[in-house]
């Protein structure tokens, strides 16, 4: 298939914890016809919907240290994820096959021209940690976000459909089940690491959100469609991958839309690098390379947020909270490199203010290392 395709000096607790856890073809033309200026070569890649692989393993770390020179614990301060995605499989119950692409699948899709269908299942374990800006005081800070952590397992169901025009659509269902509060281990991870490196501990964890079972369901659709065709830029191939997502649960309820613009000498048939929830977009699968491939990307995502337990506080009991903003946006820049069966990506994320009284927007970085099995 041919494609166009956050100032107190301290170390970050979970950064090292994570480490421990842890072709190119020219455009075809008639040789005897007068042809326009030659196009930049684009990668000829196997169709992800029909080409088998052995699945993928992904290790991710998100930390505000990655995005700033100062070592600070502030707001969304750390995220860790270890995930596995299966090889394409049709050995699924019929209800899962039907669920993988719901009735709205026909929007922006020409069902008559579908040439390949791929379904995958996955499982991941993640932890995210939030703190206020001032981590030296033991008293509650009512003008900043509360301490919070979430430890959860994610079960995912993914489908990819391609058509004879080289277009593709990716649908992802995710079920998150876990715990918010002391049992999520945020204090343990952060302060034990600070003790190990002889750094100051965060003193306010006694004020964190209380234990609560967290259940969330989300759905996301991404397009790689000729409707969003982009021209070459500086001799490099470009494309745009838009997506939409919706989530419902006591942890987070929101709806969002976004998109990623990519540029490189060749663009693979995936949907960009993955991110830790709640940010959307991307795919954990990718095409292994016989050499070295790369591309740069920029993206934006907007979310209308109805529920955020990390700001709103516990659902069924009193806890510290702060008034959240209903609209949040992420702006991201990054790079992806693929060498053999490994893919490394880095994303610098700028997140707008999430609660009233927040002095400035947040920044953090996301590092993801994936392996084709």
Image: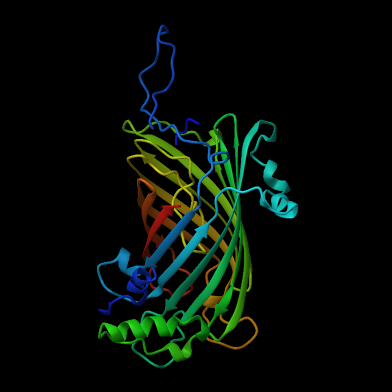
Q: Is residue 311 visible?
A: yes
Type of colouring: rainbow
Residue drawn at (27%, 80%) of the image: 8
Q: Where is residue 12 in the image (x, y as percent from the top left)?
A: 32, 75
Q: What is the number of callouts on the image?
A: 0
Residue drawn at (50%, 50%) of the image: 54
Q: Where is residue 213 in the image (x, y as percent from the top left)?
A: 61, 79
Q: Position of residue 276 (x, y in %)?
A: 47, 63
Residue drawn at (39%, 65%) of the image: 61
Foreground of the two, 287 or 294: 287
Foreground of the two, 169 or 196: 196
Q: Position of residue 253 (x, y in %)?
A: 61, 67
Above-or-below relation of 240 to 316: above
Pick out the residue farthest to the top: 32
Above-or-below relation of 7 to 27: below
* Horizontal arrangement in the rendering, residue 265 relative to residue 55 (left or right): left
Q: Quadrant of residue 201?
A: bottom left
* Horizontal arrangement in the rendering, residue 307 relative to residue 236 (left or right): right
Residue drawn at (40%, 13%) of the image: 35
Foreground of the two, 358 or 243: 243
Above-or-below relation of 91 to 124: above
Above-or-below relation of 262 to 353: above
Q: In which quarter of the image is residue 351?
A: bottom left
Q: Can residue 362 be seen in this view?
A: no
């Amino acid at each position: 298939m041919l494609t166009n395709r956050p100032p107190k000096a301290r170390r970050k607790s979970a950064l090292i914890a994570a480490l421990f856890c842890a072709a190119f073809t020219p455009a075809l033309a008639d040789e005897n016809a007068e042809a326009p200026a030659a196009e930049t070569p684009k990668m000829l890649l196997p169709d992800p919907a029909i080409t088998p692989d052995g699945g993928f393993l992904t290790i991710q770390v998100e930390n505000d240290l990655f995005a700033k020179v100062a070592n600070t614990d502030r707001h969304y301060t750390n995220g860790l994820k270890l995930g596995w995605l299966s090889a394409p499989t049709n050995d699924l119950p019929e209800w899962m096959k039907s669920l993988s692409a719901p009735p709205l699948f026909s929007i922006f899709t020409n069902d008559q021209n579908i040439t390949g269908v791929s379904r995958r299942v996955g499982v991941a374990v993640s932890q995210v940690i939030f703190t206020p800006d001032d981590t030296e005081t033991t008293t509650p800070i009512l003008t900043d976000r509360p301490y919070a952590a979430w430890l959860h397992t994610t079960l995912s169901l993914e489908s990819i459909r391609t058509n004879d025009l080289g277009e593709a659509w990716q649908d992802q269902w995710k079920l998150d089940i876990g715990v918010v509060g002391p049992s999520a281990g945020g204090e343990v991870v952060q302060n034990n690491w600070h003790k190990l490196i002889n750094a100051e501990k965060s003193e306010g964890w006694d004020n964190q959100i209380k234990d609560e079972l967290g259940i969330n369901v989300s759905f996301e659709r991404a397009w790689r469609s000729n409707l969003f065709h982009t021209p070459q830029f500086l001799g490099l191939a470009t494309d745009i991958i838009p997506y939409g997502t919706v989530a419902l649960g006591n942890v987070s309820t929101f709806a969002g839309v976004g998109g990623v613009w990519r540029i490189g000498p060749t663009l693979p048939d995936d949907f960009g690098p993955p991110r830790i929830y709640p940010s959307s977009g991307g795919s954990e699968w990718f095409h292994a390379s016989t050499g070295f491939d790369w591309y740069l990307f920029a993206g934006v995502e907007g979310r209308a947020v109805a529920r955020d337990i990390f700001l709103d506080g516990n659902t069924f009991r009193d806890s510290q909270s702060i008034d959240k903003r209903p609209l949040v946006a992420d702006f991201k820049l990054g790079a992806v490199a693929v060498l053999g069966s490994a893919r490394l990506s880095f994303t610098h994320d700028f997140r707008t203010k999430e609660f009233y009284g927040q002095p400035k927007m947040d920044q953090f970085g996301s590092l993801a290392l994936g392996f084709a099995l």
